[in-house]
Image: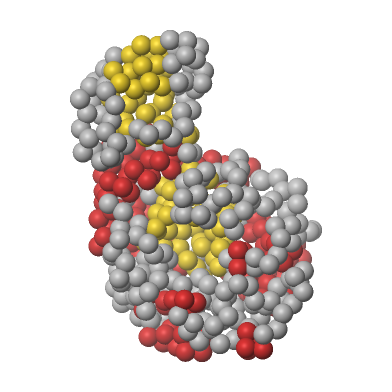
Amino acid sequence: MRSIKSLFVALFVALPAFSQVGYIPSEANQKARAEFEDARFGIFIHWGIYSILGDGEWAQQVQNLPYAEYSRMAAGFYPSKFDAAEWVSAIKGSGAKYITITSRHHDGFSMFGTKASPYNIVDATPFKRDIIGELAKECQRQGIKLHFYYSHLDWGREDYYPLGRTGWGTGRKIAAEGKKEHPATPLKRSYLDFMNTQLTELLTNYGPIGAIWFDGVWDQDAFSREEQPKIWNLYEQYALIHRLQPSCLIGNNHHMLPFEGEDIQIFEQDIPGQNEAGLSGQEISRLPLETCKTMNNSWGYNMKDKNYMSPAGVVQYLVRTAGKGANLLLNIGPRPDGTLPEEALARLKTLGAWLKVNGETIYGTDGGCIDKQDWGVTTQRGKTLYVHLLPQADNPLPETLQLNIPKAQNRLKAATLFAGGEKIPFKQTSKDITLTLPTLDNAQPDIILELTFAKEL
């Protein structure tokens, strides 16, 4: 069997040029984009040795923990209760169509059996099992797509250089010496090769992968947008990924408009265009969109953080995201023993029950032709517009609803409650449609009206 290194070299040589400038997605990639948009809902998993500390995935950075000591936690990481079948079953039962898991986070620990570094779940822990491998097999068995989060930055490696804005307190020699590089200096070639080798492993050893979800470009914020692809060698990485698996999508959580070679646009903690968390002020592209969102205030397991969104709030966030034409990637931070928090499981069950009844109004829809309103949002498919009324304690639902349809000449043929099919009286003019609403149950997280038009919207 050929070694990973020789495999990577062969792939490097096989590519005529590592350039994604003028990138044209393959037919397989375009099909994958369409399937991704239809999915509308996935689950994010942030898990690593940081879960032992119970203080989130940034504990090493926040607490300035020296790498030499932090890395010793791997020897005590033994998630004895991890069961890939249970995880995938619970996630699939929520109605999610894909899972995105951290293959390697900013602390540099790999949750798969990589040959590129001994700092991984198989070689550095007594657990000795390939978490990513077990999850990949179970996803294939249960028919759910698997995506990989992969960190661009690393708080432990000495060849992650020049340093970015984080990781100065983890005890690396280069930080202690305080060396600075010219702003146009790319990262060290050895580090770029390390990442390419790991990406090659992830895309050759674990079957079909739906997407690579990059994070960390923002660490090198001394560089301009124009310089970023050169600093990180992004086009080389993107070409490698598309060469290994043409249908594998690429997303990068860099908080900017996408670069060439990227297939989806990511918005962190925000529905596209809202920027309530302050991380998503970028313009909205025409690529498939995804919002990544925590259930509480933490990505990785935080034993003190019980500030979870309510079950109804989670449903409404999914609906609002779909109303903007985006997927929701909802996060869970597993415990160090391999179990999923009960609060997270409860919300998965709520979403699963709701989507089982109402999934038709979410899956395979586009964002509605009527943008976000005080009363809620809309989604649409073909000739059908789904009006999602989202009750709020401080904003009761109206007795009548006036809708301005962009295509005023499109005749409304029928208006009903999605649940039960009760007809809703309406009047249509050349400018708008007025619906007279029946008495509604404001205790429901989402009351859906189904409007059928004569022509496609």
Q: Is residue 221 visible?
A: yes
Q: Residue furthest front?
A: 394
At horizontal 52% and vertical 82% (from top left) the residue drawn is 119
Residue at the (46%, 50%) spot, across then down: 276
Res. 43 visible in picture: no
In the figure, is residue 125 to the left or right of 157?
Answer: left
The colour scheme is secondary structure
* Quadrant the N terminus occupies: bottom right
Q: Nearer the viewer, residue 122 or 311?
A: 311
Position in image of residue 38 (x %, y %): 47, 40
| Figure quadrant of residue 158 | bottom right
Q: Does 322 appear above or below 231?
A: above
Q: Position of residue 360 (x, y in %)?
A: 36, 34
Q: Nearer the viewer, residue 434 or 188?
A: 434
Q: Is residue 47 left or right of residue 304?
A: right
Q: Position of residue 203 (x, y in %)?
A: 57, 63
Q: Position of residue 254 (x, y in %)?
A: 59, 58
Place residue 393 in its image quadrant. top left
Residue 79 in which image quadrant: bottom left
Of residue 121 and residue 254, the one placed in the foreground of this image is 254
Q: Residue at x 34, y 22 (%)?
A: 401
Q: Residue at x 40, y 16 (%)?
A: 433
176 versus 49 height, above or below: below
- The mark total stands at 0
